[in-house]
Image (cartoon, grey):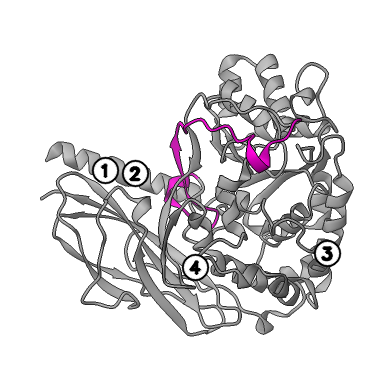
Amino acid sequence: MKKFNILLLLLLLFSFTVIAQANRKPRVIVLSDIEADPDDTQSLIRFLLYSNQWDVEGLIATTSIHQQTRVAPESMIKVLEAYKKVQPNLLKHEKGYPSYEQLKPLIKKGLAVYGMNGVGEGKDSEGSDWIIKALEKQDDRPLWVTVWGGPNTLAQALWKIKKTKTELKAEALYKKLRVYTISDQDDSGPWIRKNFPSIFFVVTPGYNYSKATWLGIAFPLPGSNTEVTSNEWLAKNIQQGHGPLGAAYPDVAYGMEGDTPSFLNLISNGLNDPEHPNYGGWGGRYELYLPDFEDSNTGMFKRENWPKDEPETRPIWTNANDSVVSAVDKKSYVGNRETIWRWRTEFQNDFAARMLWTTKNYNECNHPPVPKLAHSDHLFVKSGETIRLSAAGTTDPDGDSMSYLWFQYKEAGTYNGNISFRPYSPNLYEIPFTAPVVESVQTIHLILKVTDKGTPALTRYKRVIVTVTPQ
């Protein structure tokens, strides 16, 4: 019993540490091959609409397999100029939006060189130097580098750190990094993973995008809501009649915002937990393991000038499956893209609401509800014990009516069984929960989903992690 109490105390202390870290703004650097595809501009516009949620540390123009000899920082400036016109209005709705004057100096460029040809002696750039400067800041928060194109600017920064720092100092900098790359868009991503095994790295490896988790953002996958990613929806809710930032949002060429999943899990919505990709959120769910080798340079993805795939040499955060019942056709689907498209209606409504914030006054717009729990978000119970889950204190800033839904995020926990709230309805704001009988310590992730009845309807969450111990 004494050992159990010590373990319980350690778990509680760890939980409070995680909560404290989660409440701090993430630091974020974007690497973008902007102009290779209109979707980088699209993603940058959404990124800026949430820029009060993180500390932007850099916006770096880079190359990729799709744009090998050009970088386009001027295109980032063009988007920022549209943002400049609406930033004062955004501040009417939420605090913390950085000014144009704060953001413009953060635009840097990497070398206009493809892949590993841009890594090594004499290959420094203002972009790679800027990454090192950000890592060396006296700031213990992780530095997220979201990579929308090729990561060779990051690779050069790491090459220089390894060459110029002591092993101890270099390792301290590597451990600050959190990297999310949208698949592999040059050969420097695999090089980073192989040569810097301690770096936290999220990716669907390889050049065959057909298996990538990020496709869940917008691709017309079976069961997904295709209406909210259609050209018609984008024209009505984002582009037309929504001010200069909406007008700057380009038409879709190949796919809407393929780069956006790299930062969706950084949004503070009560569901996302960036330090735990296995918990799942708007940007998808990922598990830490060594994936099987697959040669992606085959079939429709075969290209003569694309690098060859190599087996991964260490565990990475990569594809994980969720089982989802579609709200569109009520059928069940299992897959890694499901980990994103299951939230598509919610994150698209949220995007549309923020675009309205760019031109309208506070009382003309909808704002997300504020869920509350009448208890801790980490609960410890024994097999068969009944507790009450309560959302008492939940409010909506606009005074809207709200709907509640409690559900199990099965894949995020260790308990393999299905949880039922029967005979009670899961849409009660307060509901009894009876812990299942377990033979070993198990975790269950219960999600409170609160959606207001404003236009567009907005959703926020609370995650309750229940640790169940045997009797």
Residue under label 1: 9
Q: Secondary structure at mark 2?
A: helix
Residue under label 2: 13
| Amino acid under disc 3 | Ala
Q: Relative to 168, say whether 359 is above or below.
A: below
Q: Are marks 4 and 2 in contact (CB under 8 Å)?
A: no
| Distance of label 3 from label 2 (alpha carbons) | 47 Å
In which quarter of the view is residue 361 placed?
bottom right
| Amino acid under disc 4 | Arg
Crowdedness near tag 2: few (<14), some (14–19) or many (≥20) residues, C-alpha within 10 Å:
few
Residue under label 3: 248
Q: Are marks 3 and 2 in contact (CB under 8 Å)?
A: no
Residue under label 4: 460
Q: Is residue 426 left or right of residue 211?
A: left
Residue 446 among magenta residues: no
| Amino acid under disc 1 | Leu
Crowdedness near tag 4: few (<14), some (14–19) or many (≥20) residues, C-alpha within 10 Å:
some
Residue 388 percent across, percent down from the top left: 24, 69
Q: Relative to 148, say whether 188 is above or below.
A: above
Image: magenta residue range: 275-304
Give the foreground label among 3 and 4. Answer: 3
Give the foreground label among 3 and 2. Answer: 3
Residue 61 percent across, percent down from the top left: 80, 42
Report the front residue among 436 and 374.
436
Crowdedness near tag 1: few (<14), some (14–19) or many (≥20) residues, C-alpha within 10 Å:
few
State the residue at coordinates (55%, 50%): 24
Give the foreground label among 1 and 4. Answer: 4
